[in-house]
Amino acid sequence: MGVIGKREDHVEVVTVDYPPVNALPVQGWFDLADAVTRAGRDPDVHVVVLRAEGRGFNAGVDIKEIQRSAGYDALVGANRGCYAAFGAVYECAVPVVAAVHGFCLGGGIGLAGNADVVIASEDATFGVPEVERGALGAATHLARLVPQHLMRTLYFTARRITAAELHAHGSVYQVVRREELDDAALAVARDIAAKDPRVIRAAKEALNGIDPQQVHRSYRFEQGFTFELNLLGASDEAREEFLNG
């Protein structure tokens, strides 16, 4: 259980494994951020593949951990951990290929939305259920996957969208059968890894530099409203309803 790294042919495969649904605890987000950042800094790594074991790619933060914690320590930790992990994917010195299966929710959108390439299995669904959890966040990253009005509809309704639908929007590069997902992600990663790493690293930095959306600032702005909702008591009520529902 945890975040595991494995390297082969200049491709670092970072695997998230937090049963039963990959809802990451606070430390898990920071461990993921460290693994991705460390891989990008290694000159032997040309590409990072981010994948997960279990039923789905990512179910967001561990709500049970937040509810068990006295005060706001776990909430602040989860927000800072997500900020670190999402930022690590975006700022990774080499391209990050996200291999998404099953559910990709909340924090999963933050990871996939900041990845450079998204490969998904046919059973993959994507969504931000934050409004039903009394929180805000990851609209920044959902907006990188779908057009503006669809993003707002999905955000307000907490509905999910399929991998096939995202493929039609161009944000998912390829949709494959579940058993083919890892091979498909590695195939794209190896194609990139075969290029001159000096050029690819420069290209990653250049593409981030011309990105029209300042992902760090906009996500931090969203997080401010999460803290407001917690102070108002709305978030705690929503989390309890979710856990007891």
Image: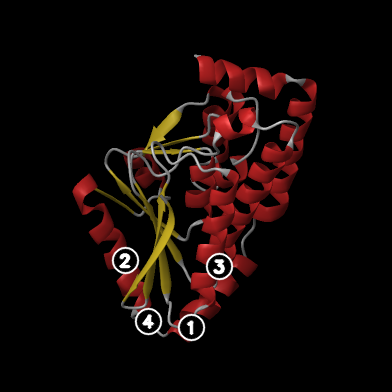
Look at the numbered disc 3 and give the secondary structure of its residue.
helix
**Which residue: 36% across, 40% down?**
56
N-term mark: 3 or 1:
3
Q: Which residue is mark 1?
A: 43
Left or right of 79: which side holds 187?
left
- Where residue 186 sits in the image (x, y, percent)? 29, 65
Nearer the observer, 66 or 60? 66
Look at the numbered disc 2 and give the secondary structure of its residue.
helix
Decide: marks 2, 1 in contact (CB < 8 A)? no
Pointer 1: residues within 10 angstroms few (<14), some, or many (20+)?
few
Q: Which residue is mark 3?
A: 37
- Where residue 210 sits in the image (x, y, percent)? 63, 66
Q: Which residue is mark 4?
A: 195
Q: From the image, state whether disc 2 or disc 3 is nearer to you.
A: 3
N-term mark: 4 or 1:
1
Q: From the image, state whether disc 4 or disc 3 is nearer to you.
A: 3
Q: Which residue is mark 2?
A: 188
Decide: marks 2, 3 in contact (CB < 8 A)? no
Three-letter code, disc 1: Pro
N-term mark: 4 or 2:
2
Pointer 4: residues within 10 angstroms few (<14), some, or many (20+)?
few
Three-letter code, disc 4: Lys
Three-letter code, disc 2: Val
Pointer 3: residues within 10 angstroms few (<14), some, or many (20+)?
many
Q: From the image, state whether disc 2 or disc 1 is nearer to you.
A: 1
Q: How is the image coloured?
A: secondary structure
